Amino acid sequence: MKTAQLEQWRGEFGRAYTDRNSLSPTALDALYRKNFGIARSELNQRFLAGIPRDARILEVGCNEGNQLCALREMGFRRIYGLEIQEYALRRARQRLESAQLALATAFEIPYPDRFFDVVFTSGVLIHIAPADLPRALREIHRCAGRFIWGHEYYSPQPVEVTYRGHKSLLWKADYARLYLDLFDDLDLVRAEQIPYLEDANVDCMFLLSRQKPRSTPSRRDVQEA
């Protein structure tokens, strides 16, 4: 699948993003404290405290592995990542030699159904156009065996935001609600709105549990049929 957003992130625009966002777990915590007044590691602990450390975890859109390195610091070892940008993927492989990393998109995840205990995104869904988003959410849901975890820009209603002078590259939304509306077999375990300290923007971290088999079409599927 080709989209205008994928092409942009695969090129020099995406490479520049990678170069300016190379962060160790310590630097990532410092950035979060600056932006939100709380460390990323503290948020991770709040949401993942009950997840066994031998859980199989996939990050969709791992870039050069900042978030995966933070999970490794927590003791998680069965970590996987997908990335669309070859430059970022090479750098991730240098940092995470034991991780399973692949060149792939959220639209075509190269793993079987329910293969992972946790599938997550961090600042990735916001860069998928609303028309394409259901396909990505369905792929994430397909290979998530137990939990879907996310940290994304938040807005109660979808809204497009100009990103570094570009249009059609960033959207805020209530991404937890979009999952829940699309899939009847998901339950909300936890969600926290996390306001920025220096402006009016808000992020949301959420954890969804896939606890019961899906026996009937979701509300969204019925509407789209």
Image (cartoon, rainbow, N blue to C red):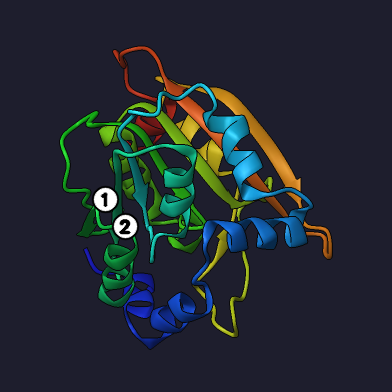
Image: 183 above or below 211: below
Judging depth in this view, the residue of 82 and 187 nearest the camera is: 82
Image: 93 above or below 87: above
- Residue drawn at (33%, 83%) of the image: 11
Measured from the top left, where is residue 86 in percent x and y? 25, 74
Graded by Cα atoms within 10 Å as few (under 14), some (14 to 19) or many (20 or more), the crowding at tag 2 reads some
Image: 18 above or below 78: below
Q: Quadrant of residue 102?
A: bottom left
Q: Name the mark on residue 96.
A: 2
Graded by Cα atoms within 10 Å as few (under 14), some (14 to 19) or many (20 or more), the crowding at tag 1 reads some
Give the position of the N terminus as an image quadrant. bottom left
- Residue drawn at (49%, 50%) of the image: 70
Measured from the top left, where is residue 212 in percent x and y? 36, 12
Mark 1 vs mark 2, CA separation in Å: 5 Å
Hey, what amino acid is under mark 2?
Leu
Q: Name the mark on residue 99.
A: 1
Q: Is residue 177 left or right of residue 116?
A: right
Quick one: SS at disc 1?
loop
User: Circles 1 and 2: CB distance less than 8 Å?
Assistant: yes
Judging depth in this view, the residue of 161 and 40 nearest the camera is: 40
Measured from the top left, where is residue 119 in percent x and y? 37, 39
Q: Is residue 196 left or right of residue 180?
A: right
Hey, what amino acid is under mark 1?
Ala
Q: Name the mark on residue 37.
A: none
Give the position of the C terminus as an image quadrant. top left
Image: 55 above or below 130: above
